[in-house]
Amino acid sequence: MKHFFAGVALTLFSLTVLAQTFDVDTILYNGNINTHINIVILGDGYTVSELDLFITDATNNANALFTQVPFSNYKNYFNVFLIKVPSNVSGAAMDPNNLIDNYYGSTFWYAGIERLLVPTKNSRISSVLANNFPAYDHVLMLVNSSKYGGSGGWLATSSTNSSANEIVFHELGHSFSDLADEYWAGPQYANEAINMTQETNIENLRWKNWHGEFGVGLYPHSESPTWYRPHQNCKMRYLGVPFCAVCVEATIETVHQLVSPLLSHNPVSTNIAEPTFPLEFNLNLINPIPNTLKRTWELNGSPLNSNVDLVLLNKTDLLEGSNTLAVTVEDTTQLLRVDNHISIHLEMVNWTIQNTVTGVNSINSQSSNLKIELYPNPFSEYLNVKLLGEAKGSLTVEIADLQGKVAIASPLSPTELNTIPLNGLNSGVFIAKFYLNSKLITSKMVVKTE
Ligand SMILES: [Zn+2]
């Protein structure tokens, strides 16, 4: 993955700065940096003789991160690297007006707050990243001090205090998942957010799909009771506890936006002189832990084995002429409320297999990735459907009742917002079925209210 905006800014910046390169070590490698999420760990206040300690601290921190839900579930989607930059002086300053000669200018007492630990030399951070690892997605700064402290923002910073791991996870909640604090951080931080609201109507709550389960509710901040949090005991409030269901879901949404689980498929395209059976078709996927990727295979519209990465076809499986083998991949993790979640991420591959009297002579493939946004849900008058990503072919949606009776079928524009008028329906539960080239690719439950 490429951190696009920063990448552009850093390219311009690096023209004016003498490029300095440092050693980059790999802590966790799951795959190509262009297909995976790259976390880069920087270290401040580590002298040359303390760089081994930096490696140990960074490794412990990364290992601990991937014991936390949902990072543990999506560990295979991440790489972790560190950049070894030595400081002249060990540790951090205790006064922003009296910095010490560490590399990134890290200091406690930022803005007069003792625990606020901030690296102040931003140009050095930019320069080190641009010259050593411009394809970063997220950056963590570990500061070599046993004093408790840290800060958030685009860069998650923490000391090496025994609570350091927890500070980094909390700060990643801000920088990776766009979460608000669930403790009262002050009126200047009060904003509508994934996990903070002034909405009191449960039906309109951003976390309504979780409300009433797993401790998720609508809890006023006692310091400012018109603002609410979704949970009483989330890592965005207290260190040492898990993220709440709402914050876990937000993190998985970020993972899904950054990474496609379908790395490649085989064969891509091939002309065959002498076919040997069985023909092999396979997917190379990044699997969550446990593997929640649902893989649905169809040959000429009839279901084959599901949840396998490899399909073998014999000559007797094929019709004479053109055959279509299709597979859809969707993450069905229970940590997303998929039945009424607004976003659906799908990966699809279609193979066209030409089978003539003389045998199979060609196989061609096409892959698509598609994100479907479906809202509002529940709905009363209409449903909006927005398509993102690419799908090769024509898409349609059907709204059917639970008996399968289709109330409305509508073609979907791939580029514009599709508004499906549904005011004629009785209230109740319906299924929105999405078809690509007349093939069912996914279904979602939707609820019609008065
Ligand atoms: Zn939370």
Image (cartoon, helix red, strand yellow):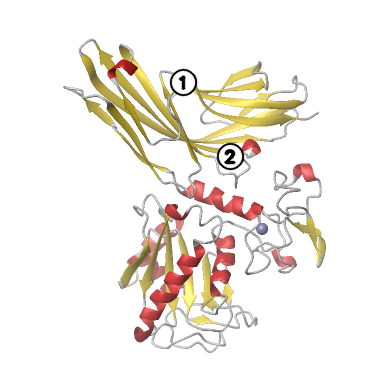
Q: CA distance from mark 1 to mark 2?
A: 21 Å
Kind of residue at badge 1: Asn
Picture quarter with ligand 1: bottom right
Residue in the picture at 33% in, 13% down: 319
In the displayed structure, does residue 49 sit left or right of residue 242? left
In the displayed structure, does residue 236 sit left or right of residue 17? right
In the orientation shown, which residue stands out farthest toward the left?
A: 273
The quarter in which the C terminus is drawn is: top right
Mark 2: few/some/many CA within 10 Å (<14, 14-19, 20+): some
Q: Is residue 326 above or below residue 230?
A: above
Residue 150 lies in what quarter of the image?
A: bottom right
Nearer the observer, 215 or 91: 215
Nearer the observer, 438 or 85: 438
For label 2, the SS is strand
Mark 1, residue position: 437
Nearer the observer, 317 or 49: 317
Q: Is residue 238 above or below residue 216?
A: below
Kind of residue at badge 2: Ser
Mark 1: few/some/many CA within 10 Å (<14, 14-19, 20+): few
| Residue 237 point in image, percent of width and height | 68, 66
| Residue 57 point in image, percent of width and height | 44, 75
Answer yes or no: disc 2 within 8 Å of ligand 1.
no
Q: Is residue 219 above or below residue 53?
A: above
**Res. 98 visible in picture:** yes
Residue in the picture at 41% in, 74% down: 124
| Residue 222 point in image, percent of width and height | 82, 66
Residue in the picture at 41% in, 26% down: 326
Disc number at residue 343?
2
The answer to whether marks 1 and 2 mark residues whose Cβ atoms lie closer than 8 Å is no
